[in-house]
């Protein structure tokens, strides 16, 4: 994502609790410590560990998960309500829809040239919904069975990152 914006002439910074494995401007830390109104645009990818409906099956085995989910939802709300006029929050289908608000739109990788599905919600503030840039026909397209590690599955497809940078940058 950072590189897609950089390639279009924007100064882009990634901010994460983890080290980046890619070149570019990256700050390792807690982004909630620097949320403010001077950012032009925030594109956030909060961890879905406690937000995704796929994770719901684990709630009965860990009594602390409900509190962690509440904390994750509060984190998303803090990003959305920060002073930045343009905010996009990306997350898979899950608890944000039922416990906060429905997303502005859902996107799929196939809408941006990737031959697989992964329904992803976008909660937008001050931004227009994304328009597909290279849709593949789900009926007649050449599809691959997506086999990903958790880390690979969490990465934003390049076509989607490019569309965000082109349309929102």
Image (cartoon, rainbow, N blue to C red):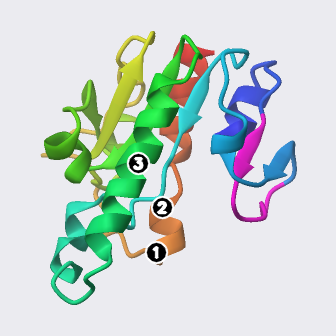
Q: Residue at x 22, y 69 (%)?
A: 54
Measured from the top left, where is residue 55 in percent x and y?
A: 25, 72
Q: Is residue 19 visible?
A: yes
Q: Residue at x 28, y 60 (%)?
A: 52
Q: Nearer the viewer, mark 3 or mark 2?
A: 2
Residue at the spot of label 3: 114
Q: Is residue 27 magenta?
A: no
Q: How many numbered tags mark residues here?
A: 3
The residues tagged by marks 1 and 3 sit, at their Cα atoms, a distance apart of 18 Å
Pointer 3 with pointer 2, Cβ within 8 A: no
Helix, strand or loop at label 1? It is helix
Residue at the spot of label 2: 154
Front residue of 80/40: it is 80
The residues tagged by marks 3 and 2 sit, at their Cα atoms, a distance apart of 15 Å
Tell me if mark 2 has few (under 14), some (14-19) or many (20+) residues whose alpha carbon lies within 10 angstroms of its own: some
Residue at the spot of label 1: 150
Pointer 1 with pointer 2, Cβ within 8 A: yes
> Image check: 81 left or right of 91?
right
Q: Nearer the viewer, mark 1 or mark 3?
A: 1
Q: Which residues are magenta?
A: 13-22
Measured from the top left, where is residue 138 in percent x and y?
A: 18, 45
Helix, strand or loop at label 3? It is loop
């Amino acid at each position: 994502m950072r590189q897609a914006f950089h390639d279009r002439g924007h100064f882009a910074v990634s901010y994460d609790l983890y080290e980046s494995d890619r070149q570019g401007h990256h700050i390792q830390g807690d982004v909630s410590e620097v949320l403010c109104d001077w950012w032009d645009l925030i594109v956030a990818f909060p961890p879905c560990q406690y937000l995704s409906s796929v994770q719901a099956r684990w709630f009965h085995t860990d009594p602390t998960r409900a509190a962690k989910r509440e904390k994750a939802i509060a984190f998303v709300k803090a990003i959305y309500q920060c002073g930045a006029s343009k905010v996009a929050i990306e997350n898979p289908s899950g608890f944000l829809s039922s416990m906060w608000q429905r997303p502005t739109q859902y996107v799929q990788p196939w809408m941006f040239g990737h031959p697989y599905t992964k329904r992803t919600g976008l909660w937008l503030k001050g931004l227009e919904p994304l328009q597909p840039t290279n849709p593949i026909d789900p009926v007649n397209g050449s599809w691959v069975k997506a086999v990903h590690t958790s880390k690979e599955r969490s990465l934003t497809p390049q076509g989607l990152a490019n569309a965000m940078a082109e349309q929102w940058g």
